[in-house]
Amino acid sequence: MRVVTTGLRVGIALATTVLLLGCSTERPDSAPADEAGTPTAQSPPAPTNAKRLLSELRIAERVPPDTYDRDAFGYAWADIDGNGCNQRDDVLLRDAVPGSTTTTQQDACDHDVLAGSWVDPYTGGTLTFDDLKDPAQAQAIQIDHVVPLAEAWVSGAAGWTDEERKEFANDLEVLLAVDGPTNASKGSDDAAAWRPRKEYQCAYARRWIRVKHEYDLAADPSEVAALEDMLGYCRSPRG
């Protein structure tokens, strides 16, 4: 667990990474960059472990985020892993259909993503773009915070330092390349208010739980019930 307190983070560790397994194997669910800056992937924890992590979450009633400040999480997107590329390019390369991307060198970044194809995990649709420097195409594929920033704020991030919030907002484990309009419809909803397609709910719940557990973010009873329901779509104890 990555426990976050005001002015102090205890037990900071690199986020573990996962493939989109469980209910779907269409593309990587999460992966950090290796030393050369190339995204890598590892297997996720089994659903049985997700249930254990869910049982360990702090339970607290959800309070409306009337003091939520997006700027407190820093600008998008910072290069917190120091590979020369911002987190958007890291996520676009990691989540793309293998071999589909066109990249270029831009300043210190060796994988500025210009084009490619992605399978949107939330809808299952295929997204293909030939010019991500075109604002319209860039807006059509967005980088989602699986646990939205406003949700993190009311779950505990309001008490973090600005640096801790910046780390969360740019953590590859928290980020996912998705369809733009679908991301807009999700907004800042928690797991009880918004769900992806049924085939992705197992992986979505496991990732949501993992992020909240790692950052010691609280969950409310309706959120826990929704996550338990989504874990019911996992195919087997081993995912």
Image: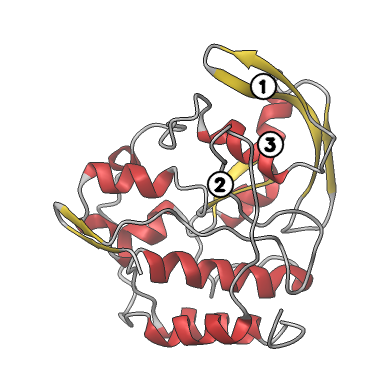
Q: Quadrant of residue 6?
A: bottom left
Please say if 22 is above or below 224: above
Q: Secondary structure at mark 3?
A: helix
Camera-near label (1 vs 2) is 2
Mark 3 Cα-neighbour bin, 10 Å: few <14, some 14–19, many ≥20: many
Residue type (three-letter) at the residue carrying disc 3? Leu
Whether residue 64 appears in this view of the structure is no
Q: Earlier in the sequence, mark 1 or mark 2?
A: 2
Foreground of the two, 49 or 215: 49
Residue type (three-letter) at the residue carrying disc 2? Pro
Q: Earlier in the sequence, mark 1 or mark 3?
A: 3
Which residue in the structure is indicated by mark 1? Answer: 135
- Say which mark, if any, is on residue 32: 2
Q: Can you say which quadrant of the picture contains the C terminus?
A: bottom right
Which residue in the structure is indicated by mark 3? Answer: 93
Q: CA distance from mark 1 to mark 3?
A: 18 Å
Residue type (three-letter) at the residue carrying disc 1? Pro
